[in-house]
Amino acid sequence: MKSFLAQRWFLLALVASVTCALVAPSLVAPITRPLPPHIVVAAALFIMAWTMPRGHLRDELARPWAAGWAMVVSYGVLPSVAWLAGGLSPALDLRVGLLLAASVPCTLASCVLWTRMAGGNEATALVAVLGCTFASWLVTPIWLAATTGSDVQLDPLRMMIDLALTLLVPVLMGQLVRLWAPARQLANERKTLLSAIAQLFVLAIVLKTAAQVGIRLEGGVAAVGIANLALSGTLAMATHIAALFIGYYSAATLGFDRPRCIAIAFSGSQKTLPVSVYLFESYYESAHPLAIIPLLFFHVGQLLFDSLVAHQWRDDSKPGEPHDIMSKMQEP
């Protein structure tokens, strides 16, 4: 039981917190409303960068082709799929939310954790996450301006500066802190604890988002419709799953080994919720208040689905092709 809880505490807390926030948003919202997303994002990134050994990245940085392909999937394939899938939703807010979820950088903690769980190459995932983070200040505003700019007054330059301050500075500071030997030793000795704290920051944003979604659903279900909400959740999951398997199969076709294929699959398809929420509150909330709903669908869905996939890939003795996993999950 202890081993089960140690491995799955985050998912259990995720399900419990999202359920609580959706059922009783008026109780949760006053607690989470004061949380500033940009501060929470910066804190989580600083901790993850502080606990990230540079030595583990040297070999991968010398041959960054796998991480580079993950970035192509993350910033090319996934937003394109979201743009096509969003066209199937008649609700503008839900289309905008899906595009917003797909255009932000890869999530850090869960991407590396899920890659590790599945037996993938963690260094590839780390380099891909860093690449997505450092490129986000440029790529994310371009995607959003191209796909949603006609509906929202965007300032791409301001968004670039905001993302640079929120994403790049904490990562650089975290790596600089590692140059101080006592800080580096503390990070190495308490890596598990610090990683759990970073995950708690992510969980706090999930809780905040779920509470906001719960409040909007109380007054917005009639306007959007149950069918559109169900369609939004389906499109969000389909977009993520498509990118996951496109990443895996394309990487295998290009000749990458299986651990790198796994890393590309996760880092190319997972997206960060805190940055999505930050951009939503900064640029989209007034014009598209229900756009936050696909953000929650996408993020919670990717964590739950990828947990199943990671455990299946790890346990598969064949060694696990994605279509085998999908067929196994459909068995009674």
Image (cartoon, helix red, strand yellow):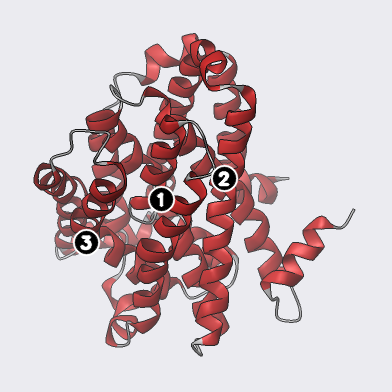
Secondary structure category for the residue under label 1: helix
Q: What is the CA distance from the residue labelled 2 to the residue labelled 1?
A: 12 Å
Closer to the eye: label 2 or 1: 2
Q: Residue at x 23, y 47 (%)?
A: 145
Q: Are marks 2 and 1 in contact (CB under 8 Å)?
A: no
The kind of residue on which mark 2 rests is Leu
Give the mark, 1 or 3, whose residue is nearer the N terminus: 1
Residue carrying label 1: 102
Disc ID at residue 8: none
User: Residue 28 placed where, x, y %?
Assistant: 46, 15
Residue carrying label 3: 134
The kind of residue on which mark 1 rests is Ala
Tell whether 62 sits left or right of 235.
left
Tell whether 3 sits left or right of 185.
right
User: Residue 258 placed where, x, y %?
Assistant: 57, 82
Give the mark, 2 or 1, whose residue is nearer the N terminus: 1
The kind of residue on which mark 3 rests is Phe
Residue carrying label 2: 235
